[in-house]
Image: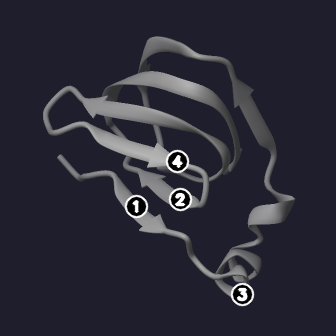
Amino acid sequence: MAEIKVERNPDRKRLEELGVFRWPIWEKEESEFPWHYDEPETCYFLEGEVVVTPREGEPVRLQAGDLVTFPAGLFCTWKILKKVRKHYR
């Protein structure tokens, strides 16, 4: 199983090259829920803090400023510790 890739605090030039600021925004309050990625997803956290625990693997803590890629086929649990606001594609 591919792993969650995290790039901490990428520079603005990198984000602009990816077109991050044109991606839709998703928001969610503190909660916990299971999730499955049918296809890869890349997102950039604007606010919040979350722990994503893959079914097979170690928990990954994500927060504002992180650029994250979730692989297709990933089954995981999201535990949102602080309200999340993120760009995604």
The residue identified by callout 3 is 13
The residue identified by callout 4 is 63
Of marks 3 and 4, the one in the foreground: 4
Cα–Cα span, label 3 and label 2: 15 Å
From the viewer's perspective, is residue 81 above or below residue 68? above
Residue at the extreme front of the image, as rendered: 82
Element carrying mark 4? strand
CB within 8 Å, label 1 to label 2: yes
Query: Amino acid under label 1?
Result: Val
Pointer 3 or 4: first along the chain: 3
Q: How many marks?
A: 4
Cα–Cα span, label 3 and label 1: 17 Å
Pointer 1 or 2: first along the chain: 1
Cα–Cα span, label 1 and label 2: 7 Å
Pointer 4 or 1: first along the chain: 1
From the viewer's perspective, is residue 74 above or below residue 81? below
The residue identified by callout 2 is 66
The residue identified by callout 1 is 6
Name the residue at 23% across, 52% down.
Answer: 2
Residue at the extreme bottom of the image, as rendered: 13
Left or right of residue 82: residue 15: right
Of marks 4 and 1, the one in the foreground: 4
Name the residue at 25% across, 52% down.
Answer: 3
